[in-house]
Image (tube, grey):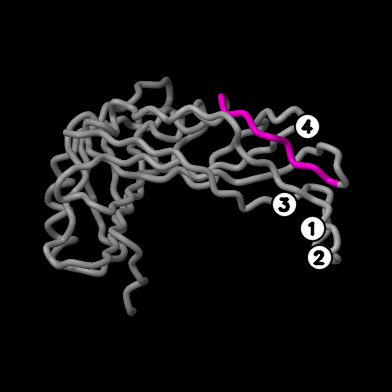
Amino acid sequence: MKLWLLGFLTIAAWAQDVPVQGLSRQARDTRQPHVISKTEPEYSEEARRAGVNATVVLSLAVNENGEPEDVRIERGAGFGLDEQAVQCIQTWRFEPGTKDGKPFKAAIHVEVSFSLLAKGRQNQRASLTFTLPSAAARPELIKGAIPSNPDAAGAALLRVRLTVGRDGKAKNLDILETTDQDWANQAVQEMRKWRFRVAKLPGQDGEIQGLFELKVGHPKAPHK
């Protein structure tokens, strides 16, 4: 399987000390940070096995020295990619933002995209998130792959709620939203074969709820 990794920066930035009112004048005197040195993100082994294409959105502050601080996940992907994205961004260096010619600490958002060139999964973006008790480790997918695209060309959406049992099996799969019911039914059948490694922590032997989302292209929300 050919691997293609892409990390790119998009700034939805705002100066922490710039008020919304009167922004037009201050915007002329304010320059947001931009990246000058970056490393590419690495795939987690879990995501590689499953053939995951995903985007992780992070928020961070770029200090006066151009160093990232307070890196946080705003929209995660799961599959071990969130941790990889954070580690990657922490090594990036920026030209700091300036206000009236002086460096200042600025807040930005960064998107880190992970892409595998795999047949049947073009233009996919997947995520798998869990509702976890305090200090609990998320289940790791050790068997199974992301469902392929629907046969019909075009954008598509699938959202499935699932439970990971104490035995690591995926069960109680419930289709919450889809643009293609036949595709969704087939995807769920594939997901029933997923197997997870579940962390064994004291007092945390219960089942874990998860939400899987798969987008192909830029789908519109289905009509209710």
Is disc 2 in contact with disc 1, using a CB cutoff of under 8 Å? yes
User: Where residue 97 sits: x, y (%)?
Assistant: 75, 41
> How far apart, in angstroms, are the residues tagged by discs 4 and 3?
15 Å
Q: Is residue 93 magenta?
A: yes
Is disc 3 in contact with disc 1, using a CB cutoff of under 8 Å? no
* Amino acid identity at mark 3: Trp
Classify mark 3: helix, strand or loop: strand
According to the image, label 1 marks what residue? 27
* Amino acid identity at mark 2: Ser
Indicate whether 75 appears above or below 70. below
According to the image, label 2 marks what residue? 24
Identify the magenta region: 91-99
Residue 138 occupies quadrant: top left
* Amino acid identity at mark 4: Glu
Circle 3 crowding by C-alpha within 10 Å: few under 14, some 14–19, many from 20? some
Indicate which disc, 3 or 2, sits on the residue closer to the N terminus.
3
> How far apart, in angstroms, are the residues tagged by discs 4 and 1?
18 Å
Q: Main secondary structure of the magenta part?
A: strand
Is disc 3 in contact with disc 2, using a CB cutoff of under 8 Å? no
Can you tell which mark lies on residue 64? 4
Q: Nearer the viewer, mark 3 or mark 2?
A: 2
Can you tell which mark lies on residue 14? 3
Indicate which disc, 2 or 4, sits on the residue closer to the N terminus.
2
